[in-house]
Image (cartoon, grey):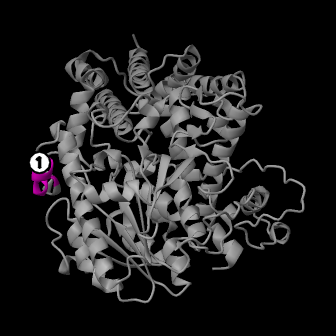
Amino acid sequence: MKNQKFFLSFGIIFYLEMIYHIFTFKSFLIKDIIYIFIFTLFISIFIDILTTFFKHKFNLNFFILIIIFLNLIFIAQFINYQFYGNVFSIYSLFNGGQIFEFFQQIFVVIINNLLAIILLILPSVLMIIYRKKIIVLDSNYQLITFKTILMLGIYILSLISLFLASDNIYSVKNIYFDKHAPTQTAKSLGLMTTMRLDLFRIICGFKESAQVIAVPEEKIVTTQYNKLDINFESLIENTTDNTIKNIHKYISAISPTNKNEYTGLFSGKNLIYITAEAFCPIAVHEEGTPTLYKLVNTGFKFNHFYSPIYYVSTSDGEYINLTSLLPKESSWSMSRSSNNYLPYTYGNIFSSLGYSTNAYHNGSYKYYDRHKSLPNMGYNYMACGNGLQKLMNCKPWPQSDLEMINGTFDLYSNEENFMTYYMSISGHLEYNFGGNNMAYKNKELVNNLPYSTAIKAYIASQAELDKALESLINMLTEKGILDDTVIVISTDHYPYGLKTSEMKEVMNIEDEKFDIHKNELIIWNSTIENPIIIDSYASSLDILPTVLNLFGIDFDSRLLMGTDIFSDNNKIIVFNDRSWITEYGKYNATVNSFTPFKENMPDDYINSVNNIVYNKYVISKNILETDYYRYIFGG
């Protein structure tokens, strides 16, 4: 009975791991369970030792507090996964973690996952009820010494066991020692081990290197590429930084995208780019949102476009849209980029061409540190709190996209050339008519639609964006510059404020993991009379190089992780857990399952694409952490 505390901590943590694992990953692989079991032993002994240094009463209370805290972490991580489909990091937890953003939505998730939440909270409830029956001793240093030796022994054995598993890119050995992939780690080694590794890597640092692809022999070609004359051989020779050297080698080995029939189509035109909050195909309704319907079905029509959600939801979605880099796990990438040289953001590249570049957001100007990141990306930035409140009403929630565009249009539209960026907010959750000002305002537009209240409220909230676009097009027409202006609209993420069952009322969702992220990309100019159908698979990561190519801007496509959608290069849609979609099929990394779209796949195709996806994450992270573009351009 003297060891009751150890068995209790082990039993509770292993129980929590199993409940989290089963309800989150919907799997029960023996290999995963064995590794979670082994690593839970180590963690349990550590907790047992930690609560043995003091007097009985303090040890007992300390032990109960630790278990309750861990219990709450499991619940928070579970709710977070239902929102965003990922494991949140220690960094996010101590920087206003995203799980605490929307308290009302937390309640909805709890209701929708009531059984899992009850099972997760059960240990804390039972521990509080039966706390007097827990046997905890006063400090005993001989026992502590023995337990410490035992803990170290189990730790060494657990590390040795990692080498017994099969070796692939996301093997347990690789994700423990060499690769930062939190979702795979949580599934294979447990949530506690994932968070322990995350904390260790934040404190001590963690470096990854991409696997450099062999450079093909030079051939005489007539094709022109989006490529600059960068002397990578000289750059490699003149750096002693191994991370920088690895990026140089990787980038120099990538095939650049080819110039194509759409290169320079919009050369010299103005650009208005909108990141539309929580936009998805449900928002496109011929009656409720006629302008969105028009823009989606004219101009370019992308049939296989996706906007995957990432770790810091809106901020990461915005970061991908504006940089064509994948966000770093366990960080706020857009905020962290604020001191980096970013030559290929719209603001910086268009301002270098003499354009007036402005950014507007109808939310708080400091939210997600946009007051630091957007000016660094080359924009004159205005939002609620640093000037926009004088031009529109910033008090309701959410605020009006229509008021934002009407209030700011005259600030840039008289310029000879302009590039304007809007981060909208009207489509923000919640989707009801009581707590969403935009939904309530536009309720009459959706009253007769045959959908649930949540779907109608969602469409009503997006109707404000629709009105804003109608007004924008009218004002551009009145100025006589509509033909000279390109409108690009994408989203930050799908509307996770809706249940999947509600989304199915309007969208065709067969595979929930992937299909909820299927979206619309709008690239529209009034001079394109007939829709141009594009069947390539593409994602938010590909927007920036596509737009740069359309505007005929000189850039090096190898320096971006996305691909010009119109190019001949292979396209890969990358998800936050390292899953992916290509023209050959879709790969679910969490359960290691591939669904083919066509026959005659290239040899070793899945491993090959897994390596490419891994490399994109590593290179994106290392570009962010090293301020890599400064090494190339001396910015």
The location of residue 472, given as percent across then percent down, is 29, 72
Which residue sits at x=20%, y=79%? 391
Magenta highlight: main SS: helix
Left or right of residue 259, residue 49 in this image:
left
The answer to whether residue 87 is magenta is no
Image position, residue 216 (x, y; %): 86, 53
Which residue is under mark 1?
433
Task: Specify start and end residues of the magenta stretch as a single range.
Answer: 439-446
Q: What residue lies at 71% left-to-right and 51% top-to-bottom?
A: 209
Above or below, comparing residue 85 to residue 322 in the picture: above
| Amino acid type at image mark 1 | Phe
Asked if one can make out residue 55 in the rendered structure from this viewpoint, the answer is no
Please state the horizontal and vertical placement of residue 428, each as a whole percent of the image.
26, 53
Is 454 above or below relative to 164? below
Q: Nearer the viewer, residue 455 or 448?
A: 448
* Numbered circles on residues, count: 1
Crowd tier of the residue under label 1, counting other residues whose Cα lies within 10 Å: few below 14, some 14–19, many 20 or above = many
Quarter of the figure with residue 225: bottom right
Helix or strand or loop: what does disc 1 sit on?
loop
Residue at horizontal 31 percent and vertical 27 percent from the top: 60
* In the foreground, 121 or 247: 247
Whether residue 207 is visible, yes or no, is yes
For the C terminus, the image quarter is: bottom right
Give 598 or 25, whichever is nearer the viewer. 598
Q: Position of residue 620 (x, y in %)?
A: 61, 56
Say if the magenta span includes residue 443: yes
Left or right of 21: which side holds 429?
Answer: left
